[in-house]
Amino acid sequence: MEELFLGQRYRATEQIGTGGMADVYKAVDEVLGRTVAVKVMHADLADDPSFAARFRHEAQAAANLQSPNIVNMYDWGQDDGTFYIVMEYVHGTDLKSMIEREGALPSRTVAEIGVQVCAALSVAHGYGIIHRDIKPHNIMVRADGAVKLMDFGIARAGPSMKTQTGSVLGTAQYLSPEAALGTPLTPASDLYSLGVVLYEAATGHVPFDGDTPVAVAMKQVNEEAESPRLVNPDIEPALDAVIVKAMQKQTADRYVSAGDLQRDLSAIAQGRSGDVAAGYAGMVAGLGVPGAAPHVAPTAVMSQVAAPEQGSVDPAEAVEAPQAPAPDSPPRRRLVWPWIVLAALLVVAALGAMWSIGPRSSQDPLVPAVDAVPEVEPVADPVIVPEAPEMVEVPDIIDMREDEAVAELESAGFIPEALRPRYDSDVRKGTVIEQTPLDEEMAPQGSVVTYVLSLGTDPNTRGKPNDDDD
């Protein structure tokens, strides 16, 4: 690899990823002596100020979000025409690679991952930031099960519309219906995308796929996904119901917030899934169209499915969109509400035309004054931006028994979440050996604090020399 030394401090050691806009390197910060990840924008894009603006936006959007479940952003800069972002290096794998390697994941593993993504979204949504590109490629999973959300490159503060006239930005397989239609996005849009991610993690397949991004986006709007349990019968009924609720086409039918979704997933992860499944059982019935193959396109600008209004151009994202044909066959189920809205607009336009008819002689035909028809504002869902959660100090629960740790966390206003226990010969069985976030860190009240219990000494290693896990 050609030597790469940026900002007179970041020395790249190996390339660990690549995308349509940038390459990612593992690097050493020679000032602080720590390992970091550096995202370097492709050289052929450096002359385009829109891409530089998007790069800077990603660093700024994530830098203000402090959460153990969001990848930390350290630095952003330019070195001799090369733009780069410096971020936390996560020892682990992205969820997409994990699914491709292992296939469908166990229900509790899926729920544990979802709990931590919800914790990250609670923080982002609390500051009015909508991620807009939730997909398994942007979810990092460490070996200990801890999860980190990354890539806020297309995030937006507050309500978000399409990025350019007739286009939307995102990854089609995870796009919410309102994003495909070009209508305003809310936190519920991220929850729909997370529902798709959970669907893929639980079944091994995305619910919708097609030959083009636009064909997939049309399915997100018009078709119902097949129930996850029909694809994978091993999925717990509660998780099946939660995924279906998160993927409802209407925003009002989804979870109210990431915290609400997090509570149901936490119950499933902890083995308390009976009430969750019973509460949403009726929602699972009657789902139809089978899921498709797991091919996923990258984040891209694509043609809007049905544009209710014209939007302004975002120079940071004005990428040429592919024009795609309609699907080969009509979808089994189509949403009725877009046509109702269209009919309502036509009625209002007709009424406006009738009122605009001016005085005319007996010889004049009854022709309305077309230029007097009033403009009609498009109908959109209300945008609700939640207040930022209160940040409180995380208590120290290391070496506590589980009941003590749970009580301590709950009294501080956190949601305790147990991860898989592991053997540790240095810590007595049943006590906490690890917590995330660490004690004395600040975290949003009502967010999840995960912990790992010791199983004591591994019976298979008694009498054997200890190996260095590092």
Image (cartoon, rainbow, N blue to C red):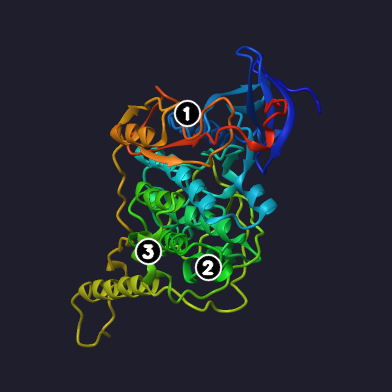
Observer-nearest residue: 461 or 416? 461
Distance from label 3 to label 1 (Cα)? 32 Å
Residue 330, position as x, y percentages in the image: 55, 79
Q: Earlier in the sequence, mark 3 or mark 2?
A: 2
Query: Residue 318 bears which disc, if any?
Result: none
Q: Which residue corresponds to mark 1?
A: 63
Viewed as shown, does residue 389 lie left or right of 86? Answer: left
Residue at disc 2, secondary structure: helix
Viewed as shown, does residue 44 lie left or right of 249? Answer: right
Q: Which residue corresponds to mark 3?
A: 250
Q: Amino acid at mark 2?
A: Arg
User: Which numbered disc, 3 or 2, marks the residue closer to the eye?
Assistant: 2
Residue 367, position as x, y percentages in the image: 29, 80
In this rendering, is residue 241 above or below 37? Answer: below
Q: Which residue corresponds to mark 2?
A: 229
Q: Residue furthest bottom?
A: 363
Density class for disc 2 (Cα within 10 Å; few <14, some 14-19, many ≥20) is some
Identity of the residue drawn at 32% across and 36% down: 410
